Each structure stands twice: as structure tokens, then as C-alpha cells.
Image (cartoon, rainbow, N blue to C red):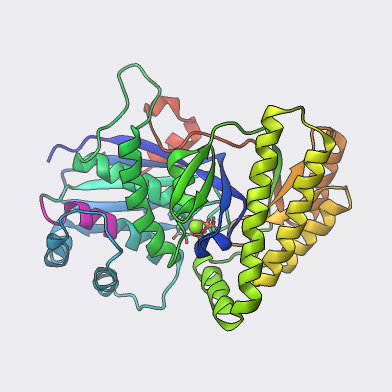
Amino acid sequence: MQVRDCLISAPGKAILHGEHAVVHGKVALAVSLNLRTYLQLKAKDDGKVSINLPNIETFVSWELSELKQLIPCFSDKKEEVQRLDPELVKKLREFMGVNNGNLDSSTTATLAFLYIYLSLFGSGEMPSLTVSVWSELPTGAGLGSSAAYSVCLAAALLCVSGKIPAPLKDGEQTGRWCQEDLELINSWAFQGEKIIHGNPSGVDNAVGTWGGMLRFLAGKIIPLSRVPLLRILLTNTKVPRSTKVLVARVKDKINKFPSIMIPVLDSVDAISCTCEKVLTEMTCEPITGEHYNILEELIDINQHHLNVMGVGHPSLDILCKVTAARGLHSKLTGAGGGGCGITLLRPETDLVTVQGTVKDLRDCGFDCWETSIGGPGVQQHFPFSVKEEILEVLNRY
Ligand SMILES: Nc1ncnc2c1ncn2[C@@H]1O[C@H](COP(=O)(O)OP(=O)(O)OP(=O)(O)O)[C@@H](O)[C@H]1O
Ligand SMILES: C[C@@](O)(CCO)CC(=O)[O-]
Ligand SMILES: [Mg+2]
């Protein structure tokens, strides 16, 4: 098999409204960030398959002959995207010598790689290659690092398998795939997310694939083409958490108190819809202070709902309190339980206020920065169009 090297990236995301509720069929509004995950795939002729994941200190190499033992499990899969096969995941766990309860970063990231690699190549020729991944996103902090990783894996391995073309044209810096190819990337990335998350809604991999701002409801993705420019402060409380654990916690709560929790999910759905309506109005009529007042109130209400769902954290309470002292409104983003929060900045929020808030939050031990949103979805890069420090990390392996 002729393997061509490729360099691919996908963005992280922030959820404006609808995290957790989206897992239960409610609307979410999400937007891509200007922080990306980069994956370099290199052809090899040493009969090995290797992954280098320096963000999570994971470096693994297998002989092709070892991986071939797994072929009988994968060869009847016909390389189709389908429901994640729990039997195959179990076989992979046995192969890796890990037990079912093991949720560590390294195990889940390795499983996601092996599942996609073996599903795509298990019934034909298995290529020798090395995949190296480096991300600008904090890992496991609510900004969609797992989805950006899964989207990059899916795009790179689909390219090698020949199921989608390499879109980069001579002389271009970046290349994007057509809609049909993006859909295929998204569905394989969703399998990766299932391995990492357990029960993902698919919103994170959709943002990683298409970029921009989108409305997500029960697997249906509607890109919002006209959105106002929003200024957002991102804060990473640095409290580690696992999306898988938090999603399971919310599910348990819904099962235990359905009549209490279902109205909360419905209310979050209404918040997402109201937010979308306000954002649309802001693009077709003059933006007023009232638009921002409503966006701020929606943030406050949703943050309370997320606390009710049991995914708050004292560090997120501190974030809300510190920003409220400066007249700003915040909520957690992503799975919660620590991780990241977003703070809406108004157009008139001046530099002194922003700098003061950032300092207050850094004094709490948090990372904090103003971010730009709406970056492009998954893309292939001409190597020298990528920042030197990223190439330097990827080229170490
Ligand atoms: N750069 C990376 N390299 C390898 N694996 C990664 C990388 N980034 C994320 N992962 C995998 O994703 C896991 C983190 O996923 P998790 O869903 O818990 O957090 P997140 O995606 O950052 O947050 P959220 O889902 O709330 O947006 C890691 O434990 C690891 O398995
Ligand atoms: C918590 C959650 O709603 C968002 C995680 O970014 C999980 C999901 O939608 O898969
Ligand atoms: Mg995730």
C-alpha cells in the first residue's frame, strides 16, 4: 500500500449552551476555537505501527505481526462505520492488557487509535506508519480535546485508506474536504469519541469537523452562517475531570429523579433556542445593550442548571464570583466538574476591566485568556504553513 505522509489539524470547541442536555436529545450551541490539535502521519517501512502522543506522555509501538492477530475480529467489519462494537473494544482491551474499568488518558487514546486503524485496515493490507499528535488545547478540560484528536485520527487514517482524497492542492497552504468526505470523517471521529466518552452526543466531533458555530440536535447539525462577533474570555480552572464520568453522573441523576431533571433539560433546551434567536437578531438589527443583557441572563440561568445537574465545582463557583465582581457573567463549558468556563465580554468592556479580570483569575491559580472563535474545521496543511514550534514537536518522532 502506498502511504502518503500528511499533516492534519482540527479545532477545539466551546459550548455556549446545551452541554449534557444535548446527550439527552436537547439543542446545543457550540463554536470552534482558534486552538487546534495537529496530527502528522508518516509512512514507514519497518513493519511497525507507532503512536506518539506527547500531551499525554503516551508512546506506543506495535509490530504489524502482533496487530495481525486481531484481524479475525475486524475482518468481517467491512470497513463500514457502524455502531461501536463493544465486543471489539473488549478484544482490544484484552490485547492491551487493561481491565474494563481503566479510564486513563493513555488507554482511551490508544484504544481509539487502534479501533479506527483496525476497522479501516483489518480486512486488507495493513500499512506501517507513525502517527504523532500535538495539541494547543488543554487535555480533558472541556474544550473538546478528545473530539479534535478523534477527528484528526479519522481524517488521517481515512486518507491513507484511500476512502477520502488528500485535499491539499499544489501551491496551497491548506485543503478542506467536500461535504460527503466531512460526513465520513465525522462518523469515524464519533466512534473515537464513543471510546473516550462512553455516550457522546456527537456535538464536539461535529464542531471539530465543520468548524464555525453550529446548532446541534439529536445528531442533526445546522451551521449558523450569520453570527455576531462575540468576545469571550476562556478560563481553565485546571481541575482535572473526565467527560465520561460526568456524562454518566448526569444520566444517573435523570434516572433517579426523572420528574425533577427532565424539566431542567427542557429549560436548557429553551435557553439554547433563545440564545440562537438573540444571536440571529444581532446579525440583522443594530446590536443593543438589551441583546447583551439577555445573553448574560441566559448564561447565569444555565450555570445554575448545570449545578443542579451535579456538574458544577467549587473552582467554577470561584470563576463566576470573581467575574461577577467585575460585572461579567460566566458559566462552565463542556462537561464541567472543573475544567474550563467561558465569560462573555460586552463590546464596551474595556481593556482595564479585561486585564483586571484576567489578573484576578490568574491569582486564583487559573489560566485565563481572551479567545477568538469560529476557526475552520478539519483541514490538511502544507507543512510549512504550520507554526514552527508545532512542527518542531511533531518532527521529534
Ligand atoms: N492531544 C491529545 N493526544 C492524545 N489523546 C488526547 C489528546 N487530547 C485528548 N485526548 C484524549 O481525550 C481524553 C480527554 O477527553 P475528555 O472528553 O475527558 O476531555 P475534553 O474532550 O478535553 O473535554 P470535553 O469533552 O468536556 O470538551 C484524554 O484523556 C485522551 O484520552
Ligand atoms: C458534556 C457534553 O454534552 C459536552 C462535552 O463537551 C458531552 C457530549 O455532548 O458528548
Ligand atoms: Mg471530550
The residue lying at 23 percent from left, 52 percent from top is: 49
Say above or below: 91 vs 342: below
Rendered residue at 69%/35% (across/down)? 281
Residue 67, percent across and down? 18, 61
The residue depicted at 78 percent of the width and 46 percent of the height is 294
Front-most of residues 80 and 138 = 80
- Report the span colored magenta: 114-124
Residue 363 placed where, x, y %? 80, 54
Name the quadrant of the C terminus.
top left
Tell me which secondary structure the magenta stretch mostly adopts. helix
User: In the image, what residue occupies the spot 42% across and 50% down?
Assistant: 149
Q: Is residue 118 magenta?
A: yes
Magenta stretch encompasses residue 30: no
For the question of whether residue 81 can be seen, the reply is: yes
Residue 18 horizontal side relative to residue 55, left or right: right
Dividing the picture into quarters, in which one does residue 270 lie? bottom right
